[in-house]
Amino acid sequence: MKRVFSGIQPSGELHLGNYLGAIRNWVEMQHSADAFFCVVDLHALTIPKESGEVGAASLRLSQLLMACGLDPHVCTMFVQSHVREHTELAWLMECHVSFGELSRMTQFKDKSAQQKDFISAGLFTYPALQAADILLYDTDEVPVGADQRQHIEITRDIAERFNGRYGETFVLPEAVIPQAGARVMDLQEPTNKMSKSLESPRGTVDLLDPPEVVVKKIKSAETDSDTEVRFDFETKPGVSNLLSILAAATQRDPNEIAGDYEMYGPLKADAADAVVEMLTPIQARFTELEADPAETARLLEFGADKAQEIAAATVKRAKANLGLLAN
Ligand code: TYM
């Protein structure tokens, strides 16, 4: 059975991009693969946080992932800091990736530009920790949105370099990026990806937004001045974003859907309805799960124990192949 691993940061609210780009695929893949899904709390520390903020967000995100359909009895779901091997392997990764390679990462360039006062070293070495996350589990496939492609590529480069120097140690992972929903754009600024940052609340649909808020955000999405409905991100980014959201929510092809509409109004109304229909059961389930944090904690502990068994074996193999003095 192939091994699948993916991660998500507990920072900000989960949004439609996270769901359509990644989580929905995770829910499907848990049934056909040996799947590991990780709340990557240590990655969230790369941007300064208040004490307690990341812990609370990790619990909430875990519950929301379960509400989306991840079943901790089917897949392995855990919190990154509960499996100490992530940080241990990250150091070995850091020593096998160059300053030049890390400097070329677009996420670092974007995020460091947004940080005025304090750019942590962790923000720069972030890809080494992500490589450790993936390589620890002998991962074949990494289901992610399109923005993570560069991170999977650098992971492969590090793994190849390590294997080349010290012999076969790591499995080379492949990114799995969905056909529809791989890059959900901001509703107000459709040339930017939808993101968790709080800068554009009207452009981001959160998974827990009440139906009337979802409808309002989608109906007031930025479109262009002519009224032609055509799927073409180059010339019509706003309309194409709505078409791809509707396509992803209804599992159809955006080009085909474009043929059904002659005006923006009905397209927006149908996209809003489809998103509300998709989110309603998730929100109901979240309310139930939220009521029992002790049960969530128990499930996460069970997941971390399962993950650690595999992670420990990988770290041991990496150290042995490196030839560190055995203890
Ligand atoms: P994060 O937490 O930013 O996002 C989680 C997942 O959601 C996808 N995504 C999107 N997909 C489509 N449209 C969007 N607008 C959109 N925004 C986010 C992301 O592609 C991602 O799949 N570095 C990772 C976390 C990570 C990780 C890993 C992922 C850490 N270790 C190991 C995979 C494997 C991140 O910041 O994702």
Image (cartoon, rainbow, N blue to C red):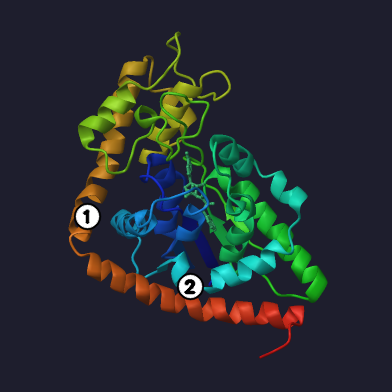
Instruction: Locate residue 1, reporting x and y percent.
Output: 53, 72
Instruction: Locate residue 24, reporting x and y percent.
Output: 40, 51
Q: Considering only vertical position in the picture, is 281 above or below 38? A: above
Q: Which mark is residue 67?
A: none
Q: Considering only vertical position in the picture, is 195 above or below 308? A: above
Seen at 44% across and 71% down, the residue is 82
Q: Quadrant of residue 326?
A: bottom right
3D distance between C-alphas at marks 1 and 2 = 28 Å
Q: Is residue 40 visible?
A: no
Q: Nearer the viewer, residue 81 or 146?
A: 81
| 311 lies left or right of 242 | right
Seen at 82% across and 71% down, the residue is 165
Instruction: Locate residue 268, reporting x and y percent.
Output: 33, 23
| 313 lies left or right of 270 | right
N-term mark: 1 or 2: 2
In the rendered structure, are the residues bearing label 1 and label 2 in contact, judged by CB atoms less than 8 Å apart? Answer: no
Q: Nearer the viewer, residue 25 or 326?
A: 326
Question: For the residue marked with disc 1, what is the amino acid?
Answer: Arg
Residue that label 1 marks:
285
Residue that label 2 marks:
83
Q: Nearer the viewer, mark 1 or mark 2?
A: 2
Instruction: Locate residue 125, reporting x and y percent.
Output: 64, 55
Q: Is residue 197 visible?
A: yes
